[in-house]
Image (cartoon, rainbow, N blue to C red):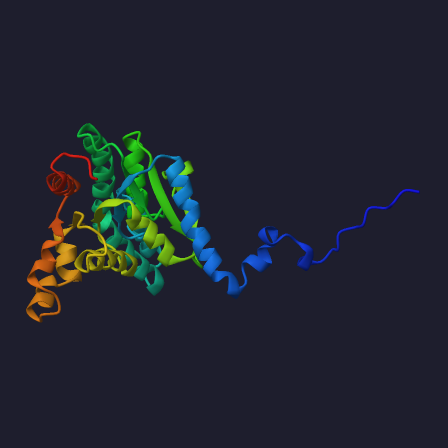
Amino acid sequence: MRHRKAAKPPIPAYSLASEDLEFLNIEDLRPLRLQLELLKPEWYLRQEGIRSTIVVFGSARIPSPEVARTSVAELERAVCESPDESQLRAELRRARKQRAYSHSYEEARKFSSLVSRKLEDAGLHDFVVVTGGGPGIMEAANRGAQDANSRSVGLNISLPHEQEPNPYVSHELCFQFRYFAIRKMHFFLRAKALVAFPGGYGTLDEVFEVLTLIQTGKIAPIPVVLVGRDYWAKAVTFDFLVEEEFIDADDITSFEIVDSGEEAIGVIQEFYGGNPPQ
């Protein structure tokens, strides 16, 4: 007499824990999700031989010059046709502001392309450009690395407005995060330099994070370069923080402000003296 094989209970409780996505997303398993989000990119980066990086930050809202020009031209035509539309006029003001900042996109692209070539020529070939993987300045930096036939990393994050990775991130080095904290940790784990272009809350948060880590000795000093003197002079009055004694005078020596990608490369090369970082 044949024994019938018992059917598996069609209930979630019987699923393997590692295959039960609903279970893996419960509140109690947040520590496990944090650990997995730390371990997965780390494992992939090791497999790909990525030992050191140059982090590039900047606004997701800054388009390429060609996109900025097209947007302004289209909105100018639309405003001419509907001059009483206040929303169109507001969009045109925003587009013109973005066009004015689009030179930062070109500088970020140029920096990434040059740094991928120059530091490799200087023996610093394992410096790999890493960005947040999104649009704007992040796209420009990943695009510049691709221009130089080099790989680049994208640490994308899931957001309510569906931020997608830009098309210039190397596919094997493109990661998605749920948690800002773990994503930020990955930015700095291999970082041997940080270059920041104009940006908003996210950019400022990331810049001050690394300055705090250096100030408190949590990481060894690395070159921190802020690109765009006019922007940074208005965005943060560092001298005021010194005058009011909220930071020491030495604290503002942990970064440099420049106007171009080439100047930023000079700062990094001077810091390392042409020798690979340890």
Q: What is the quadrant of residue 162 in the picture?
A: bottom left
Taking 56 as reference, is 168 above or below it? above
Residue 23 shown left or right of residue 254 in the figure: right
Where residue 65 appears, x then y in whole percent?
Answer: 26, 43
Q: What is the quadrant of residue 111 in the picture?
A: top left
Taking 112 as reference, is 14 above or below it? below
Image quadrant where one finds the C terminus: top left
| Residue sitting at the far bottom | 244
Q: Nearer the viewer, residue 120 or 45?
A: 45
| Residue sitting at the far right | 1
Q: Is residue 246 visible?
A: yes
| Residue sitting at the far front | 1
Q: Nearer the viewer, residue 1 or 139?
A: 1
Taking 199 as reference, is 153 above or below it? above
Q: Is residue 163 visible?
A: no
Q: Nearer the viewer, residue 164 or 170?
A: 170
Where residue 112 appears, x then y in whole percent?
Answer: 24, 38
Residue at x 23%, y 41% (from the top left corner): 106
Q: What is the quadrant of residue 178 in the picture?
A: bottom left
Q: Nearer the viewer, residue 211 or 152?
A: 211
Where residue 16 appears, x then y in whole percent?
Answer: 63, 52
Where residue 79 appears, x then y in whole percent?
Answer: 32, 56
Residue at x 34%, y 59% (from the top left corner): 88
Residue 99 shown left or right of residue 255 in the figure: right
Number of numbered discs on residues: 0
Residue at x 14%, y 52% (from the top left corner): 255
Image quadrant where one finds the N terminus: top right
